[in-house]
């Protein structure tokens, strides 16, 4: 039986609960989970002040409610699963190393920031800085898969080094900013400055993009790795046209060797 | 990114033979800047003053500062980041297409002339204003210019500096950096400083409704911030310390009139180049200083520790961390 938390008292200010991770909850009894301390602003309060808790000692965590002020859920998780029925706040799955997170609703900023492995799926919209590096950090996500069914905000995949991000809806500015590796698939395109200051990595867009002036058209091609990426994404119900794609290279300002593929 | 390569205004006055103003209008907003620190000054290294210096203005419209400039480059609105990125490519001799340069509102000849002059300068300085830092792209526009300045040091000495305004804003950054290691966007809610602009910066906290009280010293967010932030300030208990009745005072629960800094209250203000300037009061004021009000609030809180729940940081910890 999974550990189930139902919101009973909405927090007024951000509620930080980084221990809400399957690794931690797998060894805790019902009483211990209820007594875990969350930070409501600067106040330290037991989890039971905000949630009705069901279940114990499980690697599966289920959250119910409008949790847009709940932050740091699944921080550094290595195994198990988290399912959210409702909205969820910032830093979901930040630094995660394994396991699976599924959100049936919208999510905030910094989803999967600096994650090393695992899978995150957001069925609604997400905020900015998906899979990004925190301010001052050199690299964002290093592996794993993030799927956003809806739209996403600014700086998606900022400084990411490896891994895959798929966004179903449009993304805002600076998608793939300072990207160092990995793949971003944009099914509905992006606003401006996509791939700015890219060093390496691949951005695939199924819709036309406004290119940075420092990207150069290279060729129209059908890349050989696309069938491999399609196979990787097929179990999640994501299909990818085989092409052809227009290949742009840049960013020459760095100068970088990133590539942007736009479906022709 | 290359960090912030900067210097004092004294060094600019003595050495800068090539000055770029980007997205700012110093002729109207910093009227003494030209005469005291930049283009008009004669110095040991630039004895002919204005004749030894070249000034470039990059802006979206021809402001009064354009009359003082040797070269005025009118960039298309919202294309600053693209133009700076093109400059970064051109200084490294990377090819950029004519039509991509034309998208910024400039032609190749003007941009290549700028690159040539930048590389040929002995000491270059870029000042940037809110026309760059507060338009679409915001922090990335500033980061782009700072990176360009850092990269120019592969060819010649180059620095960059923001054109600050609104009193002692530089002082707030400098003090927070000195106390916490971070300049702004800091949260103390866990008892130690954490930094994340966008999450902890004031405008974002207010827009999301992430605070249940506001304490505002010497600022007027009610006049400058977006409407959702102003609406939230009106909903929560807001306390304002200011010498004047401001827009924020009108929506605040409490306004405490304080003595104006530098006129009736002593202290230290930081110039835009982060140099501390001691202020001596010229007039007496019947009102207390900001420092005195904050100290008395801290003392009042310290006398009533039962206000704080178990496990929260003590008021003494706040005092030692923030040390206002």
Image (tube, grey):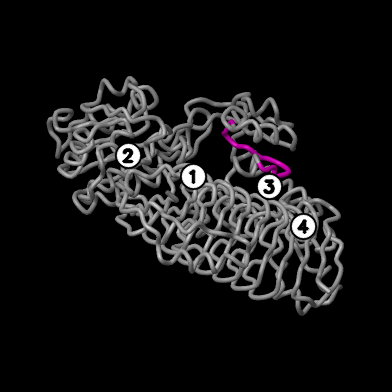
Residue B298 is marked as 3
Which of the chains bears the disc numbered 1?
A
Q: Which chain hosts label 4?
A: A
Q: Nearer the viewer, mark 4 or mark 3?
A: 4
Q: What is the crowding at mark 3: few (fewer than 14 residues within 10 Å), some, or many (at least 20)?
A: some
Boundaries of the magenta span: B208-220
Per the image, label 1 sits on a secondary structure element best described as loop
- The nearer-to-camera label among 2 and 3 is 2
How far apart are the two marked residues, 2 and 3, measured between alpha carbons?
49 Å
SS majority, magenta: loop
- Figure check: A96 above or below B102: below
Report the Cα–Cα distance between label 4 and label 3. Answer: 43 Å
The residue pinned by badge 2 equals B83
Q: Residue A85 carries which label?
A: 4
**Is there a contact, CB below 8 Å, between mark 4 and mark 3?**
no
The answer to which of marks 4 and 1 sits earlier in the sequence is 4
Percent position (x, y) of residue A100?
66, 69
Q: Tag 3, which secondary structure? A: helix
Q: How far apart are marks 2 and 1 (CA)?
A: 16 Å
User: Residue farthest to the bottom?
Assistant: A27
> Which chain is disc 3 placed on?
B
Residue indicated by mark 1 = A173
Disc 4, SS: strand
Q: Nearer the viewer, residue B55 or B249?
A: B55
């Amino acid at each position: 039986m999974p550990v189930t938390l139902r919101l009973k008292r909405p927090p007024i200010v951000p509620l930080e609960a980084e221990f809400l991770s399957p690794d931690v909850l797998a060894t805790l009894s019902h009483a211990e989970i209820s007594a875990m301390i969350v930070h409501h602003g600067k106040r330290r309060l037991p989890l039971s002040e905000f949630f009705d808790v069901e279940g114990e000692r499980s690697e599966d965590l289920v959250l119910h409610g409008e949790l847009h002020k709940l932050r740091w859920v699944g921080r550094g998780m290595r195994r198990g699963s988290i399912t959210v029925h409702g909205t969820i706040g910032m830093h979901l799955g930040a630094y995660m190393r394994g396991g699976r997170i599924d959100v049936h609703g919208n999510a905030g900023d910094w989803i999967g920031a600096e994650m090393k492995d695992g899978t995150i799926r957001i069925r609604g919209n997400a905020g900015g800085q998906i899979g990004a590096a925190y301010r001052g950090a050199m690299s964002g996500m290093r592996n794993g898969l993030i799927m956003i069914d809806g739209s996403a905000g600014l700086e998606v995949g900022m400084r990411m080094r490896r891994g895959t991000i798929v966004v179903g809806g449009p993304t805002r500015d600076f998608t793939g900013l300072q990207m160092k590796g990995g793949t971003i698939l944009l099914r509905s395109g992006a606003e401006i400055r996509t791939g700015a200051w890219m060093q390496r990595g691949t951005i695939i867009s199924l819709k036309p993009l406004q290119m940075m002036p420092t990207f150069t058209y290279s060729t129209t091609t059908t890349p050989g790795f696309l069938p491999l990426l399609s196979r990787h994404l097929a179990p999640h119900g994501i299909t990818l046209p085989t092409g052809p794609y227009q290949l742009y290279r840049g960013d020459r300002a760095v100068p970088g060797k990133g590539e942007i593929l736009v479906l022709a | 990114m290359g960090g912030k390569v900067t210097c004092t205004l004294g060094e600019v006055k003595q050495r800068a033979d090539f000055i770029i103003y980007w997205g700012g209008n110093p002729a109207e907003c910093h009227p003494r800047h030209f005469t005291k620190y930049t283009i008009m000054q004669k110095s040991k290294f630039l004895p002919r003053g204005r004749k030894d210096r070249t000034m470039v203005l990059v802006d979206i419209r021809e402001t009064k500062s354009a009359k003082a400039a040797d070269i005025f480059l009118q960039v298309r609105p919202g294309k600053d980041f693209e133009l700076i990125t093109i400059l970064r490519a051109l200084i490294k001799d990377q090819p950029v297409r004519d039509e991509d340069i034309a998208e910024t509102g400039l032609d190749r000849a003007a941009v290549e002339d700028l690159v040539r002059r930048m590389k040929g300068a002995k000491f270059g300085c870029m000042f940037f204003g809110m026309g760059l830092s507060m338009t679409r792209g915001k922090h990335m526009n500033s980061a782009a210019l700072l990176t360009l300045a850092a990269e120019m040091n592969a060819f010649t000495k180059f620095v960059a500096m923001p054109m600050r305004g609104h009193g002692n804003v530089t002082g707030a950054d400098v003090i927070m950096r000195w106390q916490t290691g971070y300049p702004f966007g800091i949260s103390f809610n866990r008892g130690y400083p954490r930094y994340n602009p966008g999450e902890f910066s004031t405008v974002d906290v207010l827009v999301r409704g992430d605070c249940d009280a506001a304490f505002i010293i010497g600022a007027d967010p009610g006049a400058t911030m977006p409407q959702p932030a102003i609406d939230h300030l009106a909903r929560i208990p807001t306390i304002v310390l200011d010498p004047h009745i401001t827009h924020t005072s009108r929506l605040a629960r409490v306004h405490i009139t304080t003595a104006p800094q530098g006129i009736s209250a002593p202290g230290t203000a930081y110039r835009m180049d982060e140099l501390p300037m001691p202020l001596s009061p010229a007039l007496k004021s019947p009102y207390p200083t900001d420092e005195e009000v904050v100290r008395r609030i801290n003392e009042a809180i310290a006398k009533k520790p039962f206000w704080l729940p178990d496990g929260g940081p003590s008021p003494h910890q706040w005092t030692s961390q923030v040390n206002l």
